[in-house]
Amino acid sequence: MSGPKTVTRMLILSSLAAMLVLDLYPAQAQGHDSLSVRTPAQASTATPLPLMDRDKEFQMAVISSPPEIRDNSGVYVLEEHGFIKVRDSRNGFNCIVERRARHLSPMCYDAVGSMSTLQATLMRGNLLMRGIDPVEIEKRIDEAYREGHLHAPQKAGIVYMLSTDENWHDQSSGGVTVHIVPHIMVYAPYLKNSDIAVAKEQVWKTNRVWIQYEGRPDAYLIFSVGSTWAQP
């Protein structure tokens, strides 16, 4: 008979299959100059399960980086009590599938981010597996930054997010679901879109550079890139 673990894995695989279908239809291929956006009424209300099959999560994490980085990057996966490292980094990069605002974000941090912003990502996963609500998690993250337990990056660096297996839905996207196209993020602590003359309507546009999490210690400049970068 199938037990609870088998059923859970079947649900996870079904969710991954649905995300891979989205990969076949990125916003740029449809001729749009913005990320594919659905209204809350059109978007699925399903919440991604926190835990995934380890092999699936491993592959989802490393595929977020360019081929020349993948084999030597460190890798984290989420287990029952939080994130654990399953492979040490040999090039300073660390790949992970972040859990934030009820969605999955495959990303690969460079050495600068691994010492700073990645630590907030690990904290989010640990709190999530303790049953803490995502809204409360972000409050605790903010407090950890204020008290000096977490630190903003001390110099410029890069986070690769070349996978398209991501759908975004939180306050930063205006309450709509956004299908993410391949992009890179450059650390820009505390910077705001107004600082670089980006208007509100230009945020989430693939033909613009804009700032995610503006004004925060983990703010990023977002640069959309071609999907071929992620291919071998």
Image (spheres, rainbow, N blue to C red):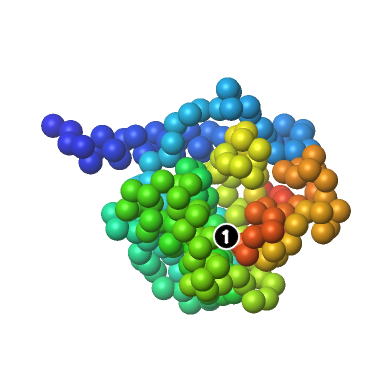
Nearest the eye: 33 or 138: 138
Q: Residue furthest right?
A: 197
Up/down of 34 relative to 86, above or below: above
Q: Residue furthest top?
A: 41
Q: Residue at x 77, y 33 (%)?
A: 31
In the picture, the quarter occupied by the C terminus is: bottom right
Q: Residue furthest left?
A: 1
Up/down of 142 relative to 174, above or below: below
Up/down of 163 relative to 3, above or below: below
Residue 12: x percent and y percent? 36, 39
In screen coordinates, is 211 left or right of 41? right
Residue 176: x percent and y percent? 62, 33
Q: Residue at x 78, y 43 (%)?
A: 200
Nearest the eye: 25 or 224: 224
Residue 124 visible in this rendered orientation of the protein: yes
In screen coordinates, is 133 left or right of 201? left
In the picture, the quarter occupied by the N terminus is: top left
How many numbered markers are drawn?
Answer: 1
Q: Residue at x 56, y 35 (%)?
A: 22
Residue 76: x percent and y percent? 41, 62
Q: Secondary structure at mark 1?
A: loop
Q: Residue at x 65, y 49 (%)?
A: 182
Kind of residue at disc 1: Ser
Q: Residues within 10 Å of mark 1 (few under 14, many from 20)?
A: many
Picture quadrant of residue 3: top left
Residue 229 visible in this rendered orientation of the protein: no
Residue 118: x percent and y percent? 51, 66
Picture quadrant of residue 85: bottom left
Residue under label 1: 65
